[in-house]
Amino acid sequence: MRVDITQALDIHAALCTVYVYNTLTIERAWSPDQVQTWWAEFLPHLLLSPT
């Protein structure tokens, strides 16, 4: 899937929220470092991968 800048910003806004962070750290027992690593590794792959 190729996304334009507006879609990339929307995806970032949807995934990098306090709600997602709290769900992962509080409800799912991820460490803050795990969340940060997931965001750092997943978002570039999702948003920048060539198709």
Image (spheres, grey):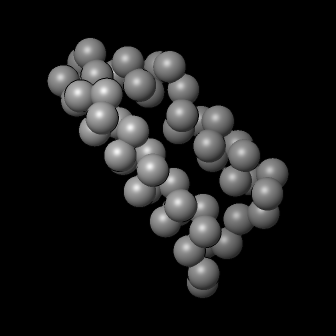
Relative placement, left or right, of 50 versus 28 is right
Q: Compared with residue 2, is residue 13 higher up or lower down, i.e. above or below?
A: above
Q: Residue at x 60, y 62 (%)?
A: 47
- In the rendered image, residue 7, in percent from the top left (x then y), is placed at 74, 53
Quick one: which residue is furthest to the front in this view? 33
- In the rendered image, residue 30, in percent from the top left (x then y), is placed at 22, 29
Rendering quarter of residue 26: top left
Relative placement, left or right, of 32 versus 40 is left
Is residue 23 visible in this depiction of the protein? Answer: yes
Q: Which corner quadrant holds the N terminus?
A: bottom right
- In the rendered image, residue 25, in percent from the top left (x then y), is placed at 28, 22
Q: Which corner quadrant holds the C terminus?
A: bottom right
Q: Residue at x 18, y 24 (%)?
A: 29
Is residue 24 visible in this depiction of the protein? Answer: no
Quick one: which residue is furthest to the bottom in this view? 51
Q: Residue at x 24, y 28 (%)?
A: 31
